[in-house]
Image (cartoon, rainbow, N blue to C red):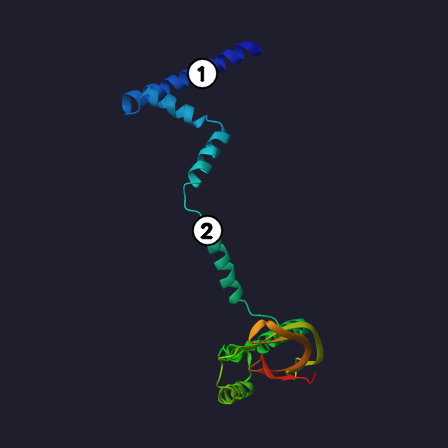
Amino acid sequence: MDKKKILIVMFLAVVLVTAGVAGYLYFFTDISPSQIISTQKESNKPIENESADRNKGENTFPVKPVKEEIKTIIINEKNTPKSEVTKTDLSRIASSFAERFGSYSNQSNYTNINDLRIFMSRRMQNWSERYVVEAKEKNPDSAIYYGVTTKAIQQDIVEYDSDVGNARILVKTQRREATGTMSNSSSYYQDIMITFIKENNIWKVDSANWQST
């Protein structure tokens, strides 16, 4: 038998099988031939159309906002143990501390000191409480404005011993002093020595001493 006859026989066999299955479903089930044809058409849909339909459906689901993603990252980072504070980290802390510590006015109720207590050792916290009380007694009149702003410009590590828990960093600053109004001001340079110690394995500022100009 040649190839042409073989192909014809195979085609007729497929037709007969299909007709038989359709007849069975038609007479013995509730499925009609039109439903069978429709089902076959659906199953023969191109893959790309099926994928597009799925993607279209996915876009209808609520998408997590970007802020929630960021919040999740922040929470995960908070739960991750931090590595040892480096010299560079401590220098940045000293710089920020010096700027806040050295910027104040007689009308700010010493917030520059009070806001920094969380970064102070117990010894320095006790000092800061006494300092604020004494300063208020000495300078009760705040009718005439007096203020100083401080900007750190350089940090020099004088001492750093992580094992012992001691560090000293000299911060060079530029300060602007004003009386009455900010337009009536003058600038000068002054260094401040920031001393750190470890309390409960956390670096804390133990003293902040302005150096003579």
Q: Is residue 134 above or below residue 60?
A: below
Is residue 23 visible in the rendered image? The answer is yes
- Left or right position of 8 against 149: left
| Quadrant occupied by the C terminus | bottom right
For this rendering, which residue is in front, 48 or 107? 107
- The x and y percentages for residue 119 are 55, 78
Location of residue 165 by image quarter: bottom right
Location of residue 91 by image quarter: bottom right
Q: Residue 45 carries which label?
A: none
Q: Which mark is residue 65?
A: 2
The secondary element bearing badge 1 is classed as helix
- The x and y percentages for residue 67 are 48, 55
For this rendering, which residue is in front, 87 or 138? 138
Q: Residue at x 53, y 64 (%)?
A: 77
Mark 2 neighbour density, 10 Å: few (under 14) some (14–19) many (20 or more): few
Q: Do the residues labelled 1 and 2 touch (CB within 8 Å)?
A: no
Q: Which residue is drawn at 49% across and 12% down?
A: 9
Q: Which mark lies nearer to you, 1 or 2?
A: 2
Q: Is residue 183 above or below residue 58?
A: below
Q: How far apart are marks 1 and 2 (CA)?
A: 58 Å
| Quadrant occupied by the N terminus | top right
Residue underneath mark 1: 13
The amino acid beneath tag 1 is: Ala
Location of residue 180 by image quarter: bottom right
Instruction: Choose the circle earlier in sequence order: 1 or 2.
Output: 1
Is residue 171 visible in the rendered image? The answer is no
- Counting labels gives 2
Q: Which residue is drawn at 46% across and 32% down?
A: 50
For this rendering, which residue is in front, 201 or 153? 153
- The x and y percentages for residue 106 are 52, 80
The amino acid beneath tag 2 is: Pro
